[in-house]
Amino acid sequence: MFSSLKGWQIGVLLGIVLVVAGGTYGAIAFIGGPDNANLGADEQLIPVQLGNLINEVSVNGSILFPNRETLVFGSPGSVAEILVEEGMRVRAGEPLATFDSETIQDLDKAVAQARVSLRDAQYTLENFQKASDLEIAQAESKVSNAKLALNDASNDWDQLKNIPNEQMFQAKAKVSSAKLSLTSAQDTLTQILAQPGEQELATAESKVTSARLSVQTAEESLIELQGPLTALQLAQSEARVTDAQLAERSAQEKLDEFMAGATEFDISKARNAVTSAETLLGNGEAELNVGASDWNDKVNDAESDFMAKTENYQNQFKTWLGIDLDPSELDPDFDSALTTLGVDLDIVFNSEYQFGEFVQGGYNSEGLPSDDPSTPWDETVVFIWQNFIPTTIVGTCSSTSISSPAAGFCVNHDFDTSATAYKQSANSLESIKAQAAKAIAVLVTNVDSAQVGLTTAQEALSDVLGPVDSLTLDDRQRDLDVASASLLKAIEDLSILNQGSGKLGVDNQMAQIELAKSNLQTAKDDLEDVKSASEPTVIENQRNQVGLAMAILADAQVELDLLESGGDLVALETKLLEVEVARLNLAEKEQELADLIQGPDTLDLAVTQAKVVTAQAALMHAENRLTDSVITAPWEGVITFINAEAGQSTNANTSIMEIVDTGVVEIDGVVDEIDVLFVQLGSSALVTMDALPGEFLQGEVSFIATEPDTQQGVVSFPIRILISLPQGLELPEGLSAVANVVIREDRGVLMVPINSLYGSFDEPTVRVVENGQVKDVPVVLGNSDDFWIVVNEGISEGDLVIMESEGSQSSQFNFGANFRAIGGFTGGGGFGGRGGGGRR
């Protein structure tokens, strides 16, 4: 102990010892002088003094480092590099080992996927939140719009379904007029084929006269239109319509009453017409089936090509920028699309920053960067392109600057190629769809016309096969046609009168005049034809007229059939479908409004919130795994062992290495069961070691076990004392040490020797000498050790008390000896400690 002291220090200590010894001797001589009270041979006076009474317990143990940690990656992968060696001292946060780039990329993808899952869960939760007033108002507006759409669709369907009587009359009149024209054309053809006679000549002249009369009547009507309209004229016109309707009904009834047979020629002709119509219909349906199939194949091929081009165009955004776009968000102009997204390829793929994360072939990055939500592109994807692709990458370039992938990549060129193909495919698809619709519509029209022609031919055959008198039938048919034409004329006249004498009415009447003049010219031409011989060209022309009249009649009959069956069935079905769609849309909007007003279901909301919490935990776990892909030192310390090497595949719990914090040193020892209750966490201790003779280190209790350690019947409790090391001092683990732990400490208290106590345990006293007299003074006692005891009340500093030597107490109770024997008071005196047992 003294070997570490210098010579002058030893001299100073000896001087102090001599001074203290001399002072003590003088005090004792003064106390025991002849002027003081008479004391016995075994008695002496002791002054009451202030001092410090400290109770300690000794703990024997060894040095250990409590802060040690086995480091793992926390996820499976392949070790890229071990950056330290065993025994190396490292700083806190220093990289120790890292995964390879492939494992880091997988972990980064897992983080990205976890972020997407969290975003989706948060989006779902937002949709479950209670709707705002604005959202409810918008939903109410959608309901109102849906109601208006349903009302409009219903009105359109009602208008299409309810056909006005006037339109029906006009359609019937048109059929009658077409039949009359056909009959007239057929009669003319018959007359041309036969030698013209006096009857035919008279008929032709009669038609000329009738046509002249029609012109005159039309001109008079025009004059009337240009004059004032009277109620009488309107009533007369309405009466003519009524009379014409009665006349048509009567002519129809008479025609029905007189049905006669037909000639073999007519029957054969009608049958041939049916056969031709059936053949035409069959050919039309076959052409429709083949054409529809061909065009559908072309459309499907075009759609498949468009889908492929769309996916390729989408992949450019995903591959280069990590941006997921819906097909509806694609812009054929990729420059416009990138501008809308806020992407400048020259900035994102700046060649000056390529391979910026590599220094002299070593990976200097702390890992893949996380995605910045403030930018539309994914920083991880761009980072990989810029640092892991061993070739040149530029944002934009000319058409010839990048000749091949081996020479580098031009991002602008890839976007341009895909966008051009996408645009061309879209245009081709629209063109093919339009061509298909047009071609199929023509084929459908042909089939419809063939069906109408077949129906007409079948009806004509039925009429021919019936028992009719041809002459009477012709007369009755002619009467019906005339009546129908008259009805049509009467309706048109009434319509003109109702329209008034305005420009529209005058224009219509002028058109009637032109028509009448045209009919007059036709009648004159017919008269000339009758007068002329039956030339082949005349016969052919007339046959063409018959065919034209048949086509006009077929069209008129189709229109009438549609009206009688309730209108255009296709149009009706389309309108009805629109009504149903509008009704379903209204129901959907009303349900959405009801859901917004009602709010989310409590159980669904709780489940959705739980999904958000789960997604947040998953994201945190994924981020921690990505962070742990590079093992860093948790504190400054020493690497004690390494259990892995570069290229080794590890699982999540594979021990990679161990690090020990040598700056935190503890003594690992035990304390006896009789002392453990007096030891507290944080109690101070003074530590000595044989390896450091003469050195005292400060410490404090850092751990007390709650479970005892029993060996061969001896019960003890493990305890640790944290040592405060001086700057620059390092201790090896395993050194033996002794720590004196303070279990109680009284500072600045009055103390007397235990041998100066008298009286009883309940009423202790001390014998005080005052003015040469001895008196017993009651005292209140406190803590004690093997020699001293604290006096809380009864005496003051400087008082002189009588102390008997060990084994010579003469008090009636031998109080001091008994007190020492039991180790102090157990009550009444505030005893706080005991002597012996390895404590002092």
Image (cartoon, rainbow, N blue to C red):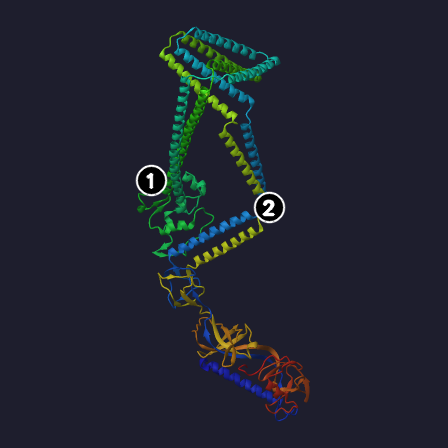
How many tags in the picture? Answer: 2
The secondary element bearing badge 2 is classed as helix
- Given residues 65 and 156, the one toward you in this image is 156
Cβ–Cβ under 8 Å for marks 2 and 1: no
Q: Residue at x 34, y 45 (%)?
A: 409
Per the image, the residue denoted by label 2 is 598
Q: Amino acid at mark 2?
A: Gln
The secondary element bearing badge 1 is classed as loop
The tag earlier along the polypeptide, 2 or 1, is 1
Report the Cα–Cα distance between label 2 and label 1: 60 Å
Q: Quadrant of the C terminus?
A: bottom right
- Given residues 415 and 617, the one toward you in this image is 617
* Relative image position of residue 124 (x, y in whole percent): 52, 48
Residue 399 numbered mark, or none: 1
Q: Is residue 105 left or right of residue 56?
A: left
* Relative image position of residue 703 (x, y in whole percent): 52, 72
* Relative image position of residue 454 (x, y in whole percent): 43, 24
